[in-house]
């Protein structure tokens, strides 16, 4: 897919840039040639769009309806809790601080971080309970998931077990946040993400 996208975009854009330059140079002296160059740009662009749609179609399956469903929000945490309970892990959830609306992308990131952390608890920790803590600060939201299971050893022993942590870190970094993961003092594992809830320039103006 990467090769297909590279070939389509790189080739088509190169052709369009060359044709646009040619049209600009002869726009006043040879309008007919400029018109031909613009027609070539239009044709190349249409062809590229068709190829792009074909490649994107590969990424979809006939029964893929997830893109039609609304993205999960913090209101859907109950689904995570219920799913863990069905898997034999009791989840205690606590929200503290002054709750406020979050940007849609940030809310989705929080949901996914908790989802991945709880998935790791169910799959790797052998714990029968976990705690989820959401703490609203003046300019950030701390998301913490704790368990009293076997800790990081199980993750490292599982093929591909680190991919979830990588995904969480990427989500946190996308929002200029910080992520701490690792064994807890006394046993168990922790995932703690601190996510800014306001733009950087506004955070600098808010007293801590």
Image (cartoon, rainbow, N blue to C red):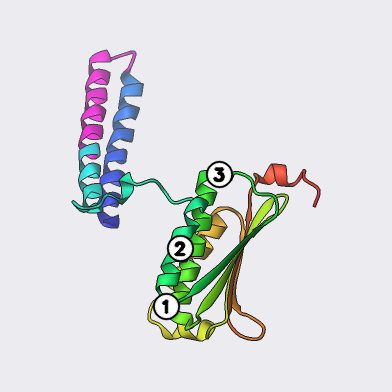
Does 84 appear in magenta?
A: no
- Magenta stretch mostly in which secondary structure? helix
Q: Which mark is residue 47?
A: none
Picture coordinates of residue 91 (x, y %)? 53, 70
Which residue is rendered at x = 22% and y = 22% of the image? 36
Classify mark 3: helix, strand or loop: loop
Quickly name the residue at label 3.
103
Marks 1/3: CA distance? 30 Å
Q: Which mark is residue 80?
A: 2
Seen in the picture, residue 97 relative to 182 is either above or below; the reply is: above
Q: Earlier in the sequence, mark 1 or mark 3?
A: 3
Q: Nearer the viewer, residue 177 or 128?
A: 128
Going by the image, does 1 lie left or right of 77?
left
Seen in the picture, residue 182 relative to 178 is either above or below; the reply is: below
Quickly name the residue at label 1.
123
Which residue is rendered at x = 31% and y = 44% of the image? 68
Q: Earlier in the sequence, mark 2 or mark 3?
A: 2
Marks 2/1: CA distance? 14 Å
**Image quarter hosting the N terminus:** bottom left
Going by the image, does 110 lie left or right of 46?
right
| Extent of the magenta region | 27-48
Label 1 close to label 3 by CB (< 8 Å): no
Q: Earlier in the sequence, mark 2 or mark 1?
A: 2
Q: Nearer the viewer, mark 2 or mark 3?
A: 2
């Amino acid at each position: 897919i990467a090769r297909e996208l590279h070939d389509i975009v790189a080739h088509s854009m190169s052709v369009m840039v060359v044709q646009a330059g040619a049209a600009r140079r002869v726009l006043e002296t040879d309008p007919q040639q400029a018109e031909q160059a613009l027609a070539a740009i239009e044709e190349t662009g249409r062809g590229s769009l068709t190829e792009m749609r074909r490649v994107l179609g590969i990424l979809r399956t006939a029964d893929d309806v997830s893109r039609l469903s609304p993205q999960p929000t913090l209101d859907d945490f109950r689904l995570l809790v219920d799913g863990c309970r069905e898997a034999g892990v009791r989840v205690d959830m606590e929200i503290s601080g002054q709750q406020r609306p979050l940007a849609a992308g940030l809310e989705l990131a929080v949901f996914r971080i908790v989802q991945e952390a709880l998935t790791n608890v169910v799959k790797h920790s052998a714990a029968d309970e976990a705690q989820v803590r959401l703490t609203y600060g003046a300019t950030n939201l701390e998301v913490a998931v704790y368990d009293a299971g076997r800790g990081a050893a199980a993750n490292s022993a599982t093929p591909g077990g680190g991919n979830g942590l990588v995904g969480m870190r990427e989500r946190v970094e996308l929002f200029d946040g910080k992520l701490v993961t690792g064994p807890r003092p006394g046993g168990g594992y922790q995932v703690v993400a601190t996510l800014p809830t306001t733009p950087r320039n506004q955070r600098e103006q808010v007293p801590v």
